[in-house]
Amino acid sequence: MARPLPSQGREEMIGPKGVIKKIEFVRTITKALYSLGYERTGAVLEEESGIPLYSSMVNLFRKQILDGNWDESLITLHKIGLDDENILKSVSFLIFEQKFFENLEKNRIMEALETLRSEITPLGINKKRVHEFSSCIVSPSQRILLGFANVGTETLKPRMKLLEELQKMLPPSIMVPERRLEHLVEQALGVQREACYFHNSHESCLSLYTDHQCGKDQLPSHTTQVLQEHHDEVWFLQFSNQGKYLASSSNDKSAIIWEVHEDRELTLKHKLIGHKKSVLMVAWSPDDSHLLTCGMEEAVRRWDVHSGECLYVYEKTGLGLISCGWLLHGKQLFSGVTDKTICFWDLDGKELDCWKGQRTSKTSDVAVTKDGRQIISMCQETVILLLDKETKIQTLIEEEQTITSFSLSEDDNFLLVNLINQEIHLWNIRNDPKLVTTYKGHKRSRFLIRSCFGGLEQAFIASGSEDSQVYIWHRSTGDLLEALPGHSGTVNCVSWNPSNPHMLASASDDHTIRIWGLSKVNRKRKETYSNGTVLHLCNGSSK
């Protein structure tokens, strides 16, 4: 038996700052020991500390619940010291509910009916639930729908579940919440993680032994590989949604699919040949099985990622296509057109819709939210249009400088906007668009430069630059963290692997793609070059 609690008075405090109440601390540890199955150890702690996990009255209440002594448990409940009448009613309701269903399962219909009439109904709460109880008397199948089937055949588990539910309702000073210690530890780790300026590692890196703090070495700042299969400027690149592939497009009229292996090395999977002009961009289908490539004011082609074969060519007579993307879980696609419209197709090339008017500019990006509801496009040089397809409500993002490109965050709530004045703006577009952060430092005077979200939970921003460097900023603060040298020409586009926060890719006018990662200890840093070429001629057709 545990020793009696020390005399009441000023509570004993522990910890370096003296803010932890010893009794609460010990009871929380004791609860954790019991929850982990260390029954004897928990009992020893109660005995040695003289601090019982529960008062004698609460222990009696718990025993009465597990034994099914419902009437006695209600008497004890009123002796525990609850002041809140609403809590008393809610706890009583759950106890009577269990009593009701156990009577039903034992075919004590009259007793169940009496509990419903004289004990549950007078509480005057949860009337909808009370009506459902009534239907259970008439229709036993209703019990299954309410989750109370066969409670009479195995009473201990339902009663344990009831006890867990009661514990959630009773004040923590009476019954320590389940898994409270784990919750406190996770909360502390979460605070450390959020305060970590360079945090870019998965949860497995967090330890209870030391305070968590990442350094800049968690950013992909070292060249791990150089890919040089393109024979002209590389304009665009994008990792697949699952991070298993990288696609790139070039002024050499080709696109390439690279495979990302488990050892983080990339190899050429397919070289996609078929465009008659430079390839502006690529777009992965949601399941990464297909890839769209868009020629410069030419056509959009759909490729099979596994085989590398061209499956279809989408084009409009007398007009050129300038962007591409996916809709409806990969069942439809869209493209910006040189006549400033946005066209929508099914996979077989049937044109479903074409939005005319000032929907796009001639050098526009187009994006669609994952639910397919909102279309985002440039409608003027300094204006981005957010159009709700269902309500037809139009919202504008108005910049003072010319917009050169934009990209949408993974959660569809933020838009990263590149401007001609060497600034990148982060806009919150959840409700009314609001400018959140500005990023500066990279160089842009003549060319189209693209930026991206990236890192763990997209906590960083990366961008290309005309000074041949890759720039990385802290997303929340806007602080410039890295300027990575390596390329010998303008860096046109960057892409962060969505599955690996330590992998970043950059495309440059120097005809190469650089893969950036962490420095590897005890291994000489060297650049490896891709080799081998696989050509796939387009055999698709436009209909």
Image (tube, rainbow, N blue to C red):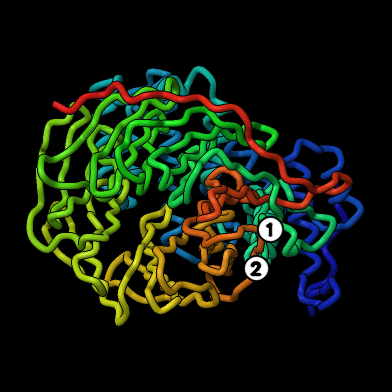
Q: Residues within 10 Å of mark 2 (few under 14, many from 20)?
A: some
41 lies left or right of 370: right
Instruction: Report which quarter residue 411 is drawn in.
Output: bottom left
Residue 347 visible at all? yes
- Report the residue that reaches farthest toward the bottom: 400
Q: Are marks 1 and 2 in contact (CB under 8 Å)?
A: yes
Residue 71 percent location from the top left of the image: 50, 41
Residue at mark 2? 482
Instruction: Report which quarter residue 148 is drawn in.
Output: top left
What residue lies at 18% left-to-right and 57% top-to-bottom? 388
Q: Please, what secondary structure does the residue beneath circle 2 have?
A: strand
Residue 91 visible at all? no
Residue 171 percent location from the top left of the image: 57, 60
Q: Please, what secondary structure does the residue beneath circle 1 have?
A: loop
Label 1 – label 2 distance at C-alpha:
8 Å
Name the residue nearer the viewer: 72 or 143: 143
Residue at mark 1? 221
What residue lies at 15% left-to-right and 45% top-to-bottom? 343
Residue 198 percent location from the top left of the image: 67, 64
Above or below, 497 against 533 in this view is below
Q: Amino acid at mark 2?
A: Glu
Q: Earlier in the sequence, mark 1 or mark 2?
A: 1
Q: Amino acid at mark 1?
A: Ser
